[in-house]
Amino acid sequence: MNKAMRVLVIAWIIICISPTYPGYGEGSEKSERNAYARWQNGPPSDPGYFPIAVWLQEPRDAQRYKDAGFNLYVGLWRGPTEEQLAALKAAGMSVICHQNESGLRHKDDKIIVGWMHGDEPDNAQPLRDGKGYGPPIAPEKIVADYEKIREADPSRPVLLNLGQGVAWDAWHGRGVRTNHPEDYLEYIKGCDIASFDIYPVAHPNPAVQGKLWFVARGVERLTEWSKGGKIVWNCIECTRIQSGNKATPHQVKAEVWMSLIHGSTGLIYFVHEWKPNFNSHALLDDPEMLKTVTEINRQIHSLAAVLNSRTIRDGAKVKTTPDDSPIGFMVKRHAGETYLFAVATRDAEVKGLFELKGLPETATAEVLGEERSMAVGNGKFTDTFKGYDVRLYRIR
């Protein structure tokens, strides 16, 4: 090979491995997230998979949840038992559950895709005599338990679901550790998947009640605390839970997309209700909410490959009018198309002027699910949002 040829070959290699070369840059198909590939028996690593779970439900209802777009159970009451796992296997519903003796007997069973800690160890724990509460479980105990779980089976990820202190420092339910957010830096060392729950609509405290952006805040904080080293999921409300307030379908959709836009890569719906009567599967008995949740879930599955592609961190900016009503947004590029997912994070009308990078002089933004589109000139377009509106744009 002569000198000129060697120069050409070296130049071609440099171009091909450059981050700006098509196929290796941000948002390209080559950069799609493969978060679960490190675990042999974990959730599917297919970029078309997005985990949408339901919390602590009876296996007998698995088919009804599958029909509503759920693909995962998290938690099994006093389980897993042989009967529960058999029912889930028959329904083809995966589960993340506690690592008890029955669970370990099924280490080779693909129906179990993860292990979990007890729920909300960061909250004050009830005393054994039932008279009051003691401190939360110490973070170092969670880390030690994590190591034991991994030692028994390293082929599956470990989920840790934390309480509302992730998003709200003043949550008094943490007892002596109220206003100690630094604890979470230690808690998340004890898991592979970090999740949390806060339910703003059903929340009894005026500091949180109706302020849906607490969901987004918690997701952001978990992502920041883990420095990208943990998979981040979160819980979604869709029933009255223990209050007289229940999120509307519009609010549930807003909470879901606030979560995704701010970095969540998995959802867990909480479907229990205590008022006016206890109902462990209240979502299934609420036709309007079930219809909306099914639609949301199916739309997420249809966009899973997009959601699992890399986020373009500086791909857009937005100017809002009024300027005290933020619009959360996220930019993705997949299969030659640009996606802008946006949500009004306050319960007020707001106009957003979006400016995206990397678009041609003229383009068209299709609003998914709304049967409308708008012209995009030099990467800019304007749209108006009512309170907590969600807009999903596909730009060609």
Image: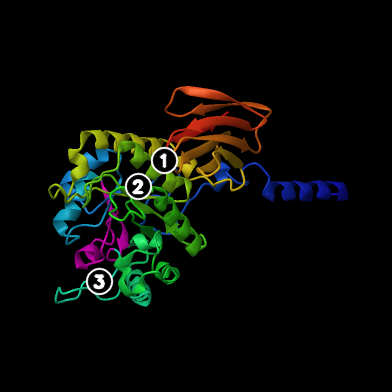
Could you tell me how far apart the alpha carbons at marks 3 and 2 are, in whole angstroms?
A: 27 Å
Residue wearing tag 3: 125
Q: Residue at x 22, y 42 (%)?
A: 283
- Would you say residue 137 is visible in this rendering? no
- Say which of 98 and 209 sits in front: 209
Q: Amino acid at mark 3?
A: Gln
Q: Are marks 3 and 2 in contact (CB under 8 Å)?
A: no
Q: Does residue 166 sit above or below 314 in this rendering?
A: below
Could you tell me how far apart the alpha carbons at marks 1 and 2 are, in whole angstroms?
A: 9 Å
Secondary element type, mark 3: loop
Rendering coords of residue 248 (x, y %): 30, 39
Residue 393 tag number: none
Q: Earlier in the sequence, mark 3 or mark 1?
A: 3
Secondary element type, mark 1: loop
- Find the magenta span and give its range: 93-119
Residue wearing tag 2: 210
Q: Earlier in the sequence, mark 1 or mark 2?
A: 2
Q: Circle 1: is it few (<14), some (14-19), or many (20+) Cα within 10 Å?
A: some
Q: Does residue 359 sit above or below 163 in this rendering?
A: above
Is label 3 or label 2 in front? 2
Q: In the displayed structure, does residue 243 sit left or right of residue 188?
A: left
Q: Amino acid at mark 1?
A: Asp
Could you tell me how far apart the alpha carbons at marks 3 and 1 are, in whole angstroms?
A: 35 Å
Rendering coords of residue 363 (x, y %): 62, 26
Residue 186 counted in the magenta span: no
Rendering coords of residue 20 (x, y %): 68, 46
- Say which of 291 and 388 sits in front: 388
Q: Are marks 3 and 1 in contact (CB under 8 Å)?
A: no
Residue wearing tag 1: 347
Q: Residue at x 33, y 56 (%)?
A: 197
Q: Are marks 1 and 2 in contact (CB under 8 Å)?
A: yes
Q: Residue at x 34, y 60 (%)?
A: 164
